[in-house]
Image (spheres, grey):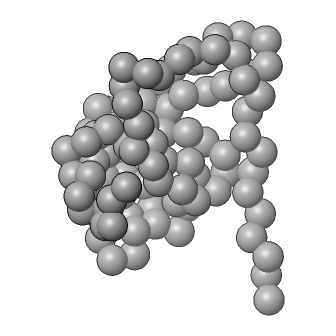
Amino acid sequence: MASSIQEWKGKAICVVTSDGRTIMGDLVGNDQVQNVILEDAQERIYSNDAPVETVELGLYVIRGDNVCMIADYDKEKLVDTAAPPLPTILQQQH
């Protein structure tokens, strides 16, 4: 496990956004407000009754306020099976 996202630079990461999108790519960089830049990015669209759909995005920037989770993953172990899509993630307002 990395103690800083900087240790993942150049490696494959998966970003789940607050609207439930799953975007994967190689980490190019990030900043102090967690904006993330991915190279060779692709969005993976899941559904209950169909295989995973992949949309090529290329070089892609995700705003830090839309990042919900960042994780590394092994491209060799990635499986394309049907799965329910993630619901939108709601934040509690104070």
Occupied quadrant, residue 60? top left
At horizontal 75% and vertical 51% (from top left) the residue drawn is 88
> Can residue 8 be seen at all in this image of the molecule?
yes
Q: How many marks?
A: 0
At horizontal 43% and vertical 21% (from top left) the residue drawn is 77
At horizontal 25% and vertical 42% (from top left) the residue drawn is 11
Q: Residue furthest bottom?
A: 94
> Can residue 59 be seen at all in this image of the molecule?
no
Residue 30: x and y in percent read 29, 63
Occupied quadrant, residue 34? bottom left
Q: Is residue 58 above or below residue 4?
A: above
Quadrant where the image shows the C terminus? bottom right
Looking at the image, residue 8 sits to the left or right of residue 75; the answer is: left
Looking at the image, residue 44 sits to the left or right of residue 86; the answer is: left
Q: Is residue 67 above or below residue 15?
A: below
Residue 65: x and y in percent read 53, 68
Occupied quadrant, residue 80? top right
Residue 9: x and y in percent read 21, 52
Looking at the image, residue 82 sits to the left or right of residue 64; the answer is: right
Q: Residue furthest top?
A: 50
Residue 24: x and y in percent read 42, 37
Quadrant where the image shows the N terminus? bottom left
At horizontal 72% and vertical 23% (from top left) the residue drawn is 83
